[in-house]
Amino acid sequence: MEYSQEERAIIGLCMAADESRLSSLARALAEIGLPSSQKICVSVIEKAAMRVYKDEPLPSEAEQDAAIARLEALNMFAVTLVSADYPASLRAIPDPPPVLYGMGRRELLARRKFCIVGSRILPAWAEKTGKTIAADLSRRFVIVTGIAEGGDRAAIDGALAGGNLICVLPNGPDVAYPAAHASLQREVARRGLLLSEYAPGVKTKKYAFHARNRILAGLSDGVLILAAGARSGTLITANCALEYGRELFALPHNVGVAQGEGCNEMIKAGAWLCTCAGDIFAAYGMAAEEKPRIRLSEKEERLLAVLKEAGELHAAVLAERVGLPVFEVQAILASLEMKGLAVRSGGNRFSAI
């Protein structure tokens, strides 16, 4: 894989940094601010790196070559802040990762994404509902989640069959955490995409889960919480979604169920109540199912076009506009209703769907 000079410089800087320096580098970048120009962006990143590295030398070209060779040996790739396919939504958050390391289908980064997460302890009904929602959503969105048990696993099981899945990790993409998930991570890398801000070989740290949650929300158009206790770490992802202006959805739970307290509070505070994928599609103005193209006559096409432009019309007014007898317009409207393309309201008025 070919990398530009700018990409190589950033990859070299970030792969040479330990986890604490990486966090400091992201904070320094947030303080300085990122311009849109690639070359200026690299100079800003180098300026931020000087704050973090202080008197230590920055990585040489030979070290950059070694870093990229290591990625290739592990069948991994890197996407930097100046790469064309770095997700724009993530770049816009206050502290975007300078580099994303990936293993799997890079093209998924360019597609529309939706996050599904939940606490590790998930009621059986919520797990089943989460799987169904993830499977249905994955026909229109790439599902973004972590790789823990509970809510993450429900999202994975629902979306993995179609391969439209990104799992964001709190460690290097080549590190399995927990170790029992090694085969699952290999399967995600084969069908979907493993993604992390941490370089290969970096082990999991407790604080990395919190940092990872900002990426889950930053990548996605919206976030669905399947289950969350009053103090669940999942609430960090929900708060990031609100901070970034994303739509927040929550599965409603019975009153008194500890795993659902956080979800119920979110709904009370204004989050979308969600029980199926259709609720999410509706929030984005999308039809719940892809409708096959319906064949229409020339007159049906003409009436439907007028209704779409006008919004709502009485049948008699519509007849005048299209120059047809009222009885004929009534018959055409009945046909459009049967095809699910028009709806009748009070007073013999119609509108397009």
Image (tube, grey):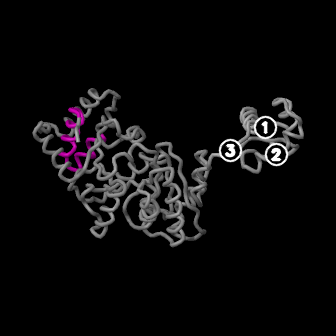
In the image: residue 133, left or right of residue 209: right
Marking on residue 226: none
The residues bearing labels 3 and 1 have C-alpha atoms spaced at a distance of 23 Å
Q: Which residue is under mark 3?
A: 295
Q: Are marks 2 and 1 in contact (CB under 8 Å)?
A: yes
Specify the label residue 345 is tagged with: 2
The residue under the point 42% across, 65% down is 153
Task: Tell whether position 5 is magenta.
Answer: yes
Q: Locate residue 5, reporting x and y percent.
A: 20, 32
- Callout 2 secondary element: strand
**Residue 350 appears at what percent x and percent y?**
80, 41
Number of other residues with Cα within 10 Å of mark 2, as a class: few under 14, some 14 to 19, many 20 or more: few
Label 2, label 1: how far apart the Cα atoms are: 9 Å
CA separation in Å, label 3 and label 2: 24 Å
Magenta part of the protein: which range?
4-27
- Secondary structure that dominates the magenta span: helix
Note whether residue 231 is visible. no
**Which amino acid type is marked by label 3?**
Arg
Q: Residue 82 at x, y = what percent? A: 30, 34
Read off the residue under disc 1.
312
Helix or strand or loop: what does disc 3 sit on? loop
Query: In the rendered image, which quarter is residue 255 located in?
Result: bottom right
Is residue 259 placed above or below 47 in the rendered structure?
Answer: below
Residue 78 locus on image (x, y percent):
26, 44
Residue pictured at 62% horizontal, 50% vertical? 291
Q: Amino acid at mark 1?
A: Glu
Q: Say whether residue 200 is visible.
A: yes
Amino acid type at circle 2 is: Ser
